[in-house]
Amino acid sequence: MEIRPVAVPGYERVVRVSDPDARLLAFIAVHDTTLGPSLGGMRMWPYRAEEEALTDVLRLARGMTYKSAVAEMALGGGKAVVIGDGRRQKTEALFLSMGRAIESLGGRYLTAEDVGVNERDLEIVRRETRWVTGLASGSGNPSPFTARGGLFGMRACAEEVFGSPSLRGLRVAIHGVGAVGGALAQLLHAEGARLVVADIDAEKAQAIARETGAEIVSDEAIFEAPCDLFSPNALGGVLNDRTIPRLRCRIVAGCANNQLLDETRDGAALRDRGILYAPDFVINAGGIINVGCELLPGGYDGQESTRRIDRIADHLREVFRIGRAEGIPNAAAALRLAERRLAEGRKRRPKA
Ligand code: NAD
């Protein structure tokens, strides 16, 4: 196996991992450990070129730094990407090799699940390194926790726009009812919200409709569904110059990562349309908060995790306050809040 450093300005450590015997080619990026060890999932994806994988790991690792900073977790940002098709190219040798690569970073990077990598794969990684989180023996599947954070975030949004945190009677359009969107739909139903859902997987949409009485629309019609709150929980990039003009909502609040195709342009477009945007990395931090609670001095603590997840509402209120005070879109305000938390961390723990 060869672990070769890649020099990237602004990143603490980036390595290219190759192990031809295990058919492994991967990148691990540690963006910033000012606030603690970097934690972020391992993604397996059929990138067409190494350059594309490197770009993705850098973007994702930086996003994790901001997400954990705003969530006030003592964590930094990191990520790993494995080049390959998660449905066809997984082998035990590949994940063992990945485990050895993570171990070589000495705890600076802790891994977790991400697209294409599941708990079974992480159990294999765990045989070579203890720097693995989110296993069944630890905090388990993060999705219900992400959904809970989404619900508390939505309450803060409702309070900001309608003057009350109650979601009762509000109409919520949910784009994507998978692990997170489905759990969110159930929580919203229990709160008395009225739902309209879309998913390219018709069975998932139907199952949610049966459980919650949601109306089902197509994955295009959902963008035009009249509603109080539009909630993206499928893929990234769904808020763009094609979809934002069609939205008929007062709030956008969901748990998908990287919802804005262009952070600056689309963040401003939402504000200009008078739509309150809950920045994705603030509202979708429930999963990382839960996984991060495995690193508490006494080990994983479910109650403490819940307490911290519920504070996502406070973090969003702070974002809205900064946005108002500085006259900037919420997407920019969230970045400012993250940078501020990092600057405070640097002051507390000056680096050598
Ligand atoms: P998932 O794969 O379980 O669910 C995604 C759902 O979106 C699926 O049901 C899929 O069929 C649907 N979908 C895909 N493309 C669609 C389209 N064009 N229109 C409508 N539906 C579509 O994944 P998940 O774990 O629920 O994650 C959802 C999003 O939340 C992702 O962006 C993920 O990065 C983000 N996220 C997840 C977590 C977590 O804890 N799982 C944490 C933070 C962020």
Image (cartoon, helix red, strand yellow):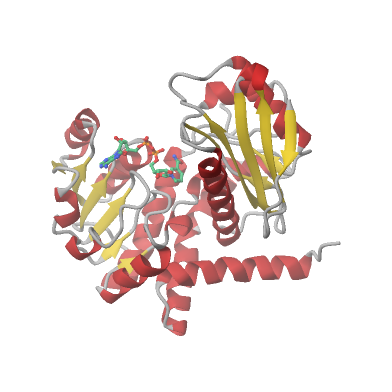
Which quarter of the rendered picture does the N terminus lie within? top right
Measuring from the top left, give residue 53's x and y in whole percent.
53, 41
Tell which quarter ligand 1 is in.
top left
Side of 274 where 341 appears, left or right: right
Of residues 184 and 274, the one nearer the viewer is 274
Measuring from the top left, give residue 162's x and y in whole percent.
26, 71
Measuring from the top left, give residue 251's x and y in whole percent.
28, 64
Location of residue 264 (image quadrant): bottom left
Q: Residue at x 48, y 77 (%)?
A: 322
Measuring from the top left, give residue 238's x and y in whole percent.
31, 52
Q: Residue at x 26, y 46 (%)?
A: 175
Q: Is residue 327 above or below residue 174?
A: below
How many discs mark residues in the rendered view? 0
Location of residue 226 (image quadrant): bottom left
Q: Residue at x 56, y 16 (%)?
A: 91
Decide if residue 192 is in sight here.
Answer: no
Side of 122 where 315 appears, left or right: left
Q: Residue at x 58, y 36 (%)?
A: 112
Q: Is residue 294 above or below residue 166?
A: above
